[in-house]
Amino acid sequence: MSKLEVKKVEDVSFEIGARYDGILWQMKNGSIYISLSNLLLTDGNRWYDVPIKNLEKVAILQEDPLKIQLTLPNILIILTGGNADRLMALRHLLIPYLSKKGGEDIKALLKLWHLGIRNINGLKMLLYMSEEEIGQLITDARKRALIDNDGNITKRGMDIFNQEELNLMKEVLNG
């Protein structure tokens, strides 16, 4: 039987909640550990297993004090801790393992853009991204000629949507 290697990263406070309803469970004080395939959070009584392969984003929500947000398909986890350097190191360690869904992120940005939501703060809130990530998405969309220099979605940008998505966006715009 092989031994599972787990290393403690840091003592943290964490919140875990549903991604879309904005409801967070009560903040818990505990620790975060890492293994080859999982992050493990514990409050001393209960363990929460977070498969690294399911992570979609690891974003900085706030710099002082540092708050890191881990985004999974239906769950948000917000971490804070005494040693910001260790949390930043964890973030940098996890970034290469994220399941990149850049195409989906661009598509989500373009949907909101088409509906007239172009304010960075609004986009940050709706896409669960940092200002830096939103800026990078907009830059990528422009480089890929999905948004033109006047801020309009190009034909190429509209072509990424299927007919059902186009109909839904049209329905939302027309009220």
Image (cartoon, rainbow, N blue to C red):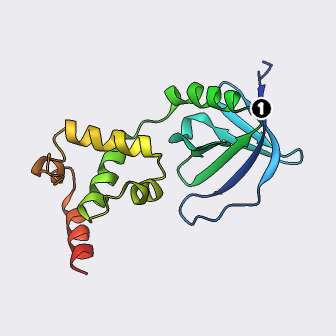
Q: Give how far across and how far down residue 126 sits, in percent.
A: 44, 59
Residue that lies at the very extreme toward the top in this rendered image: 2
Q: Give how far across and how far down residue 116 sits, in percent.
A: 26, 65
Would you identify the image quadrant in which residue 9 lies?
top right
Image quadrant holding the N terminus, namely top right
Instruction: Give above or below for 52 relative to 149.
Output: above
Residue at (15% x, 51% y) in the render: 159
Q: Nearer the viewer, residue 163 or 78?
A: 78
Q: Which of 161 and 83 is in front in this view?
A: 83
| Left or right for 127, reference 174 | right
Residue that lies at the very extreme toward the right in this rendered image: 45
Residue that lies at the very extreme toward the front in this rendered image: 64
Residue at (47% x, 45% y) in the render: 130
| Left or right for 92, reference 27 | left
Image quadrant holding the C terminus, namely bottom left
Residue at (56% x, 27% y) in the render: 92
Residue at (52% x, 30% y) in the render: 95
Q: In terms of secondary structure, where does tag 1 sit?
A: strand
Q: Give how far across and how far down residue 36 sits, in percent.
A: 66, 24
Q: Which amino acid does label 1 sit on?
A: Glu
Q: Which of 3 and 134 is in front in this view?
A: 134
Residue picked out by circle 1 = 10
Q: Give how far across and how far down residue 49 sits, in percent.
A: 71, 41
Judge the density around disc 1: few (<14), some (14-19), many (≥20) Cα neighbours within 10 Å: many
Q: Which of 93 and 84 is in front in this view?
A: 84
| Left or right for 112, reference 45 | left
